[in-house]
Amino acid sequence: YNEYKSYLRLMMKIGVQYSYWIVIILVSYCSSFKTPKLMGSLIKEHTVPNYKYDTIYMEQDLDHFTFQKNPQQYKQRLLINKDHWSTGGPIFFYTGNEGDIELFAENTGFMFDIAPKFNACIVFAEHRYYGKSLPFGNQSFSSWEKTQYLDVNQVLADYANNILMLKSEYPEGRDVPVIAFGGSYGGMLAAWLRMKYPSLVQGSIAASAPVWMFPGMNVTRCSGPYEIITRVFNDISSSCKDKVKQSWGDINQLGGSTKGRAQLQDLFKTCKPFNSSGDVMMLSMWLESMYFDMAMVNYPYPTSFLAPLPAWPVREFCARADKLSDTLEGIAAASQVYSNYTGTSKCLDLDSDPAGGLGMQAWTFQACLEIILPICSKAKFDMFPEQGWDLKSYVAACEKQWSSKAKPYWLKHSFGGVDGFNFFDASQILFSDGYLDPWSAGGVEQIDEPVCRFDCPKVFIKDGAHHLDLRGANENDPASVMEARDVEVAAISRWISQHRDYKLEL
């Protein structure tokens, strides 16, 4: 089990940082290891506070890279808002990532905020195999034959077809510029879409996209995310950080006896008793995931993106932890900030999934075979238990699980350049990263050299957590994120003007 703990840890933390539910899937796995056409009219209108969109479905080829005469197709979901669109206005295109697309639409208010300024159409495209865009319905993950079409190049081809459809189906869309937006894995896709299809996308806003974190890139240490989390907690309270660091040993010690395990259940108010040291390990892993989550969504106002949380959740956690002198009492009390901030939960369910809109099965497939992001922890430098990273073991486990071949270097070779951290021929991509975000460890801020051939601004947000700049404007936004959005708006304006000037020349 310990041999693949890093595998479990990685699965929990990639992308928008899933909840602990993913561990249940992977624990079972580890045990076994050891032994372009628009579909009809509008489907519905959906409204959330300040955000409104219509839902349509588009037929997509399941395999874009075949010359089969009648290829198999599936229905992809898109969310569209045309309230401010007028002839000549751009298309703002969100490259959907690992989850239900409505979750991302409801947490990407920046696009809605600036659409009136640009007379823009807003489109959120759902990623294949997530949400309601399941090629084989609930059988989409039943066999390799059905899941094999889940890869980055197929996804980017879906998005290219979406853009072609928008330009052909809507009179307002003819010859208009397209700006791609995305956060986290979606930010990677936004950047890669511009690289892969520059004639269709005039520029991209890639927020919190760890594009230089893949095997072989050698830009960042695998321990980088955990070191950032540790720094975020330490900046709030060094004693809080020390409590977290000490808690692992205390948990393991209590987990070694029946009496100690009963004490842990009482402290953390778990729904199920700890009957073994393996159950206690689940608690430790849940806590690791919680710390990652809180650092990543350490926003300056209350949110419910991953779980209902207060403003600056790390600060609130540390305030509660520091009130109690006993290490585990403090950690247990403070963990209520994440697990039960609303006060409605009777017990801590380690099997539950607060981020229920995120796609677990699809992401384990992707993170196993293609989107492999090395993560480790080094107790000397961070507040987490020592855990290494071994690519060979990781790949072997994944290939056995999925009866397939992993390609750990494929994305580096496809998009990262020969040396792994220079997009030689790319242009007009803005990369933003936050100082508080663990995933900034794999962001473009890690080196000083130019990112691409031209016009690829790098924006570093001092008070920013995971793609805070893509969220809607809030009265509690720090100055650094407002300044970042100003830079992004200026870049969008520049790219749109260049597109229009080029059209005039023609």
Image: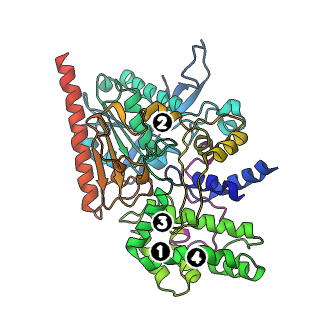
Q: Which mark is residue 241?
A: 1
How far apart, in angstroms, are the residues tagged by discs 2 and 1?
A: 35 Å
Q: Which mark is residue 343?
A: none
**Residue indicated by mark 4:** 247
Residue at the spot 58% in from the left edge and 26% down from the top edge = 62
Residue at the spot 63% in from the left edge and 80% down from the top edge = 267
**Place of residue 35 in the rendered image (x, y in percent of width and height, measured from the top left):** 82, 49
Against 453, residue 13 (above or below) is: below
Q: Secondary structure at mark 1?
A: helix
**Nearest to N terminus: mark 3 or mark 1:** 1
**Nearest to N terminus: mark 2 or mark 4:** 4
Provide the residue span drawn in magenta.
Answer: 339-362
Q: Which mark is residue 381?
A: 3
**Nearest to N terminus: mark 3 or mark 2:** 3
Relative to 346, is 48 on the left or the right? left
**Nearest to N terminus: mark 2 or mark 1:** 1
**Place of residue 323 in the rendered image (x, y in percent of width and height, measured from the top left):** 47, 85
Amino acid type, residue under disc 4 in the picture = Ser
**Place of residue 298 in the rendered image (x, y in percent of width and height, measured from the top left):** 41, 64
